[in-house]
């Protein structure tokens, strides 16, 4: 097992990465303020992992309250959040009760926001069971729910006490979900880590074959990158915005597909292709790199042809994004692989980009 620290002063916390570690009670108990924990999970993950974790914690003397949510992004909403509060209150959970989120990014974002808000904040542990959650959503403290008018519009920055990333849980993950997680892994190489991007180019087959050593390295390197960025800019006032590469385009694509057509990571891959094309136009990225980026995304079995929604629709959908400031849209662009920056982009440039992209796809 390896441990990475997210350095945030008194709120610093460990990310434990290993195989067959998610039911090791000794990783949890030292972070508990009281021997009571609410395990928030969903109906897909519960039959796979809930009993093992509950039994291990109960054997260590912990009073366990299981809370099983419906599965899916469409349930990342107010009603589901309220059902978590109902269960916490009915089971007499207190300020010292720890909420443990066992599942993918949806469970993590919901469980985290419940922890941030229940009784004005209770301790929280993330146990991510998708690749996307292990490399991205469980680290850094962004929690929240969707609003009918926009994704992740309601939420809080709330850091966990610990993250327990068990790569053996990825064995039950559908192939498509594994690939979706790889989109966020590739992102770290693109924005700040050329050697990692090159490593991914060489090891993609091993990752798709779920070779434990390759997966553990990809999760570790991703978490190291994310921990460094979050440690330097917890509240996204600067460098953290680089983690949004492809996300403004991606959120528009996800919304246009009604959150059904594309998984989050797939939409990020499509958004990354658009961000790469934009980078050639505004950030002097060498045009040959677009093909290199598409090739790695394709090798990860991710889609690379952004939907032809038309410039007007894209721009309307993107203007609801949180990254809009005083009506101007900010984008992450690449100067090179491993070198990125954030800047405002003229509307006319975006219109040209979408017109050209519509012709290519
Ligand atoms: P998800 O949580 O919907 O999980 C994907 C699917 O895999 C679900 O059906 C889930 O039940 C299932 N699953 C989870 N673990 C499994 C396992 N081990 N075996 C089999 N099936 C399993 O999706 P996701 O991709 O993990 O997360 C996407 C969400 O994360 C989005 O809501 C996105 O907005 C959010 N997100 C948040 C942050 C953040 O910083 N907070 C960052 C990126 C994404
Ligand atoms: N997933 C982007 C962030 O955590 O900032």
Image (tube, rainbow, N blue to C red):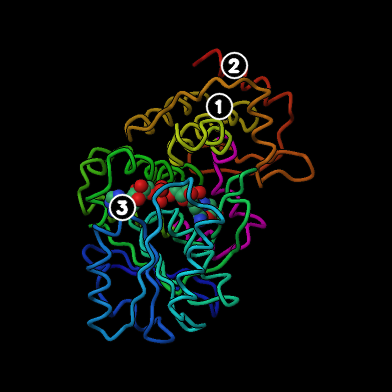
Residue drawn at (43%, 39%) of the image: 263
Q: Is residue 223 left or right of residue 95?
A: left
- What's the magenta region? 225-249
Helix, strand or loop for disc 2: helix
Query: Residue 26: x percent and y percent?
Result: 28, 80
Left or right: where 15 falls relative to 315: left
Determine which residue is flagged by label 2. Answer: 356
Name the quarter where the N terminus is drawn: bottom left
Beta carbon at label 3 within 8 Å of ligand 1? yes
| Marks 2 and 1, how far apart at CA | 10 Å
Q: Is residue 218 visible in this depiction of the protein?
A: no
Query: For the point 36% across and 64% down, which residue is it?
Result: 127
Where residue 297 sits, quadrant-wise, is top left
Note whether residue 166 is visible.
yes
Disc 3 designates what residue? Answer: 44
Q: Specify whether residue 228 is painted magenta.
A: yes
Q: Are marks 2 and 1 in contact (CB under 8 Å)?
A: yes
Going by the image, does 40 lie left or right of 86? left
Closer to the chain start, of discs 1 and 3, is 3
Q: What is the quadrant of residue 42 in the picture? A: bottom left
């Amino acid at each position: 097992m390896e441990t990475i620290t997210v350095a945030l002063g008194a709120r610093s916390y460990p990310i434990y990465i290993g195989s067959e570690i998610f039911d090791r009670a000794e990783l949890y108990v030292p972070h508990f303020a009281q021997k009571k924990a609410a395990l928030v999970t969903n109906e897909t993950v519960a039959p796979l992992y809930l009993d093992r974790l509950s039994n291990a914690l109960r054997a260590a003397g912990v009073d366990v309250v299981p809370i099983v949510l419906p599965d899916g992004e469409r349930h990342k909403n107010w009603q589901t959040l309220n059902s978590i509060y109902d269960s916490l209150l009915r089971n007499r959970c207190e300020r010292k009760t720890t909420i443990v989120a066992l599942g993918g990014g949806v469970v993590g974002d919901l469980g985290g926001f419940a922890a941030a808000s229940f009784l004005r904040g209770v301790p929280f542990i993330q146990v991510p069971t998708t690749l996307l959650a292990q490399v991205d959503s469980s680290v850094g403290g962004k929690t929240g729910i969707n609003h009918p008018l926009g994704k992740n519009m309601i939420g809080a920055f709330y850091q966990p006490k610990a993250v327990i990333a068990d790569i053996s849980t990825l064995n039950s993950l559908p192939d498509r979900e594994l690939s979706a997680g790889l989109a966020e892994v590739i992102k770290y190489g693109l924005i700040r880590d050329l050697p990692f991007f090159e490593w991914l180019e060489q090891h993609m087959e091993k990752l798709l074959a779920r070779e434990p050593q390759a997966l553990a390295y990809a999760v570790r390197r991703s978490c190291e990158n994310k921990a460094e960025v979050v440690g330097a800019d917890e509240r996204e006032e600067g460098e953290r915005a680089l983690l949004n590469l492809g996300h403004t385009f991606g959120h528009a694509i996800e919304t246009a597909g009604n959150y059904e057509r594309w998984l989050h990571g797939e939409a990020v891959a499509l958004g990354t292709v658009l961000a790469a094309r934009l980078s050639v136009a505004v950030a002097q990225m060498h045009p040959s790199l677009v093909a290199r980026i598409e090739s790695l995304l394709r090798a990860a079995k991710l889609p690379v042809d952004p939907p032809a929604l038309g410039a007007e629709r894209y721009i309307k959908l993107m203007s609801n994004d949180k990254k809009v400031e005083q009506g101007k849209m900010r984008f992450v662009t690449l100067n090179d692989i491993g070198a990125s920056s954030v800047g405002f982009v003229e509307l006319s440039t975006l219109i040209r980009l979408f017109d050209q992209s519509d012709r290519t796809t």
